Amino acid sequence: MTDDTQQVSTRRPLDRSDERVKHADTAGSVIGAFVDRVRSGDLGSLPVVVGLVVICTVFESLNPVFLAPDNLVNLLFDCSTVGVIALGIVCILMVGEIDLSVGSVSGFSSALVGVLWVGQDWPVAVAIVTALLLGAAIGALYAFLFNRLGMPSFVSTLAGLLAWLGLQLYLLGSSGSINLPYGSPLVNFGQMLVMPPIVSYALAAVASLIVFATDYRTAARRRAAGLSASSLGRMVLKALLVTIVLEFVVYYLNLGRGIPWMFGLFVGLCVVMNYALTRTKWGRSMSAVGGNREAARRAGINVRRVYASAFMLCATLAAAGGILAAARLASSSQQAGTGDVNLNAIAAAVIGGTSLFGGRGSAYSALLGVIVIQSIASGLTLLDLSSSLRYMITGAVLAIAVIVDSLARRSRLSHGRA
């Protein structure tokens, strides 16, 4: 037997085996793979989705207004402000650190926009850009204290919480608040502007196409590497289901006022951040540093630069959230950024699935987490119940999320040893 014949005869069984693996895409195999991922601790968004369904079911049974289109539209408006801040928290948690000053930074940026725009007659666009740049500078200061002086992020951002709150009170002075002009583009954006129906339907279709294109590209890469991959039929079915769900949601919201542009901005930021975290070298470096800082350093990653980018993104997004909050309330006041804004932003990121231990998280966790928190707040408001219940329920949900994260982490570690 020649060498060529021997090579062919030894390759054929392997090729047929690979084909069976690659195309084993039946419903049973899909369900089995999902169960295996759950057992290994890879829960993904499953806990928060289940929790959201339970919350909606309970509040809808107690008050049918909860799932009314107009109430959901108001909920989306409210989600956007805290959600943008929570998106920054996702970045800092990814590297295993924390920023306790995001609420104060958002309030400070809100006050700064009001003072520059209304008090000093600056163009609103210039005032907004200035507030965002100062947010980035605050993040750079935290990064310097952490990287160069070794100050723990808990301490530096706790000091920042007090400092930026003091600056906010100083800027607003004795009046305590600055009313933003009604009818201005910024206030309209925060209170009134919704997408035309045709635009919202088109964006839902584009999102479905992006899901299909992403899955197709991933499958092509896996096949090129000789790994198992989803079949074309399964990818088409998934995209079709996503299309149906998104188009129905858009249709239902359009029965009310429609989808807010401010919420569209928040979702757009989540999409961009998700791409950066999952498809870029920077995103992989964030996960590596959060998972094991020393291993990342030895692998050639500039750890200090990664930390700096995380702190700066977190503070900049906090400033953006403060500007959106000012637009939503049509004022810059001493109450902006105080109260539960800080804790809600952190809770949203954790409830949505971002790990407190670093190295694992998703931009969409901010989206899911803030919807859970705002759903609880909206439901209790409709029932005319005390805000004390909202704090207790949100705290319980946060505790459950951390427990689930800890158990999932333990399961992943034990699965990895096995």
Image: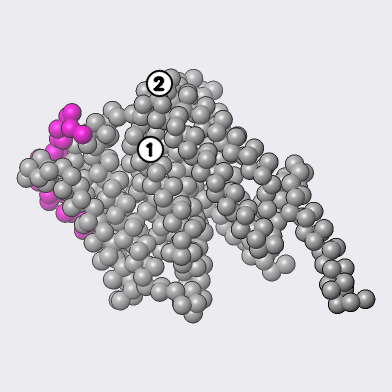
Q: Residues within 10 Å of mark 1 (few under 14, many from 20)?
A: some
Can residue 242 be seen in the rendering of this structure?
A: yes
Q: Position of residue 335 (x, y in %)?
A: 23, 42
First in residue order: circle 1 vs circle 2: 2
| Quadrant (top left/top right/bottom left/bottom right) for the C terminus | bottom right
Residue 131 painted magenta: no
Q: Secondary structure at mark 1?
A: helix
Q: Secondary structure at mark 2?
A: loop
Q: Which residue is mark 2?
A: 256
- Amino acid type assigned to the residue bearing label 1 in the image: Gly
Q: Which residue is mark 1?
A: 264
Select label 1 or label 2 by which is in front. Answer: 1
Q: Residue at x 50, y 77 (%)?
A: 299
Q: Position of residue 18 (x, y in %)?
A: 77, 59
- Amino acid type assigned to the residue bearing label 2 in the image: Gly
The answer to which of 109 and 344 lies nearer the viewer is 109
From what the image shows, is residue 59 above or below residue 6? above
